[in-house]
Amino acid sequence: MTRKLLLENDHIEGIRSYDVYRKNGGYRSVEKALKKMSPDDIVEEVKKSGLRGRGGAGFPTGMKWSFLAKPDGVPRHLLCNADESEPGTFKDRYLMERIPHLLIEGMIVSSFALGANQSYIYIRGEYMYVLQILEKAIQEAYANGWLGKNILGSGFDLDLAVAPGAGAYICGEETALIESLEGKRGNPRMKPPFPAVKGLWQRPTVVNNVETIAAVVPIVNDGGDEYAKIGIGRSTGTKLISASGNINKPGVYEIELGVSVEEFLYSDQYCGGMKNGKKLKACVPGGSSVPILPHFLVCKTATGTDRLMTYESLSEGGFESGSMLGSGGFIVYDEDQCIVRNTWNFARFYHHESCGQCSPCREGTGWMKKVLHNIEIGKGKMEDIDLLWDIQSKIEGNTICPLGDAAAWPVAAAIRHFREEFEWHVKEPSLSQTQNYGLISEKSFVTESV
Amino acid sequence: MNVEESKLNIELPRELLDEVQRVISMYPEGKQKSALLRVLHIAQAHWGYLSSERMDYVARLLHIQPIEVYEVATFYSMYDTTQVGKVKLEVCRTGPCMIEGAEKIISYIENKLGIKEGETTEDGIFTLKAVECLGACGYAPMLQAGEKFHEHLTEEKVDELIELYRQNPVANYMGLKND
């Protein structure tokens, strides 16, 4: 039976409210942390747990925390990144909407560990109704002495507030989030200095994803070693996966890292297999930015081993034949889906969301969108495919923030694996308007791209 | 109307000014600019859209320069700087929603309301917008109206929603407390 650490109680009636949450063991980690542990003890437990950032980058959380500068007399801040906007990802909304107190509990313990006395949850503006759920839960936490001055008589003070964005994917990038929280446009900052040294209002700042902060609660309750027992290798603990696309049971699932992709995709416990008995064509396993995998590389790696839901296994083979766990936005495509259309759709998304600071991203995303659209509507030329490859290669690595990479990777992977489908669109401009290409042939992935 | 008069006519009601003060108090002294995004949501929910006069008013509330408000209001896609309908129907069009039929939902609404994506109905009730991922990929296709997410859309559900909002066009309460 799969262990659940975050969504263990999400089915309990009324768990959104303080009383029910508390009755079911809520806020125990705050009692333990503030009464029995030092901030460094908590950082140590998080390091031992092997917890890695759940927003997409997968950076070890304990290490990120240990980078936080602690100059005397300068306030530090913990910011929760609830700007969930990566297409295919809807796990944080699920968690905040159902168990808002879990996030608040995690914020209290994590703020204590970091010595932050004023913390914020930055939530995407479209989740305004979730912001209200969080604000109500925060009021309850204040009323019951978990926030405010001298919490549990420990001498630790914490104020917690929620701030909305207003529709900008880029604000999920941590320095853009900080700019936005300062009331500005979400233009990412040049690094260094890193937020750990100069973040919100030029003060040392840690930015963590909702799920990461929630995971600190079971880590403090049960210990980092216990958490690290779940999973495989450097992929420890549980992960929330948002499953969408042509599957029988879309939704949010908490998995133990290490479950096989095949089990996740086909078992009734999770996705329940392909909808309408269709064949699997492709899968984007970690949100729209990560490379798309053709059907024969989803459940198996290029060397024929079972692909697992772990950071390492999903990226096995590099970008030639692998992908990434990313945010856990698991999008499944059946044989009736068009990869050119999907790639154009994502390119349009990144063009819309580019902040416009760096020319490779600002211009390149628009260019890719237009070229892909031409191919999609039957007006493409064969050299357009090479042109796309050229554009994406010149965006990647040439921008201030990772949005450029995120825009380039899906285009590169689509051409790498589905080049024959792109060529078919060019060769069969009218047929491609009424039919889909179907599955691609298995051998094509070994071909060197371009 | 001269400039001074138009300024006088722009004022949020008392309860919303209290809400603005509550938001400002979330930040340290001198950092009130951090309240800007939230205050713009409040202003837009109250007035429907952010005219330059309304943005100037927000600048005065927060003791910042008008340009600091304009550049934010024009950066974020949720703010409208021109008149829109009382109810914005914002249909997600990104990846997972597309493969579940978002485009069909958009054309269905276009035909039903007799407008194109981006336009507002003549009676001023509906604006139809296609927007990027709203974080409801597993419940596609979906649209947002005001604060509400409407998921697993079908043509029948769209009919019901349009009827509902036509009779009670008050969906744009983004950022205001709903009791």
Image: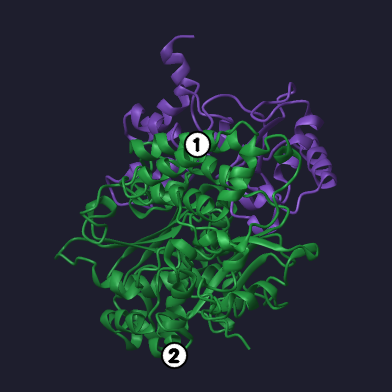
Chain colours: A green, B purple
Residue sticking out furthest to the left: A72
Residue assigned mark 1: A383
Residue sticking out furthest to the right: B156
Residue assigned mark 2: A226
Q: Earlier in the sequence, mark 2 or mark 1?
A: 2
The answer, for residue A11, to whether it is visible in the render is yes
Location of the N terminus of chain A (image quadrant):
bottom right
In this rendering, position of residue A183 left or right of residue B137: left
List x then y, in percent, for residue A107. Answer: 41, 69
In this orientation, which residue lies closer to the viewer: A136 or A417? A417
The answer, for residue A97, to whether it is visible in the render is no
What kind of residue is marked 2?
Answer: Glu
Q: Residue at x 25, y 48 (%)?
A: A190
Q: Residue at x 27, y 55 (%)?
A: A199
List x then y, in percent, for residue A352. Answer: 50, 38
Given the image, what chain letter belongs to the residue carrying mark 1? Answer: A
Residue A122, image quadrant: bottom left
In this rendering, position of residue A158 left or right of residue A386: left
In this rendering, position of residue A97 left or right of residue A206: right
Q: Residue at x 20, y 65 (%)?
A: A69
Image position of A282 with respect to A419: above or below: below
In this orientation, which residue lies closer to the viewer: A157 or B107? B107
SS at mark 2 in the image? helix
List x then y, in percent, for residue B163. Answer: 82, 38
Discs 2 and 1 carry the same chain letter: yes
How many other residues sit within 10 Å of disc 1, few (<14), some (14-19) or many (≥20)? few
Marks 2 and 1 sit apart, C-alpha to C-alpha, by 55 Å
Image position of B119 with respect to B139: above or below: above
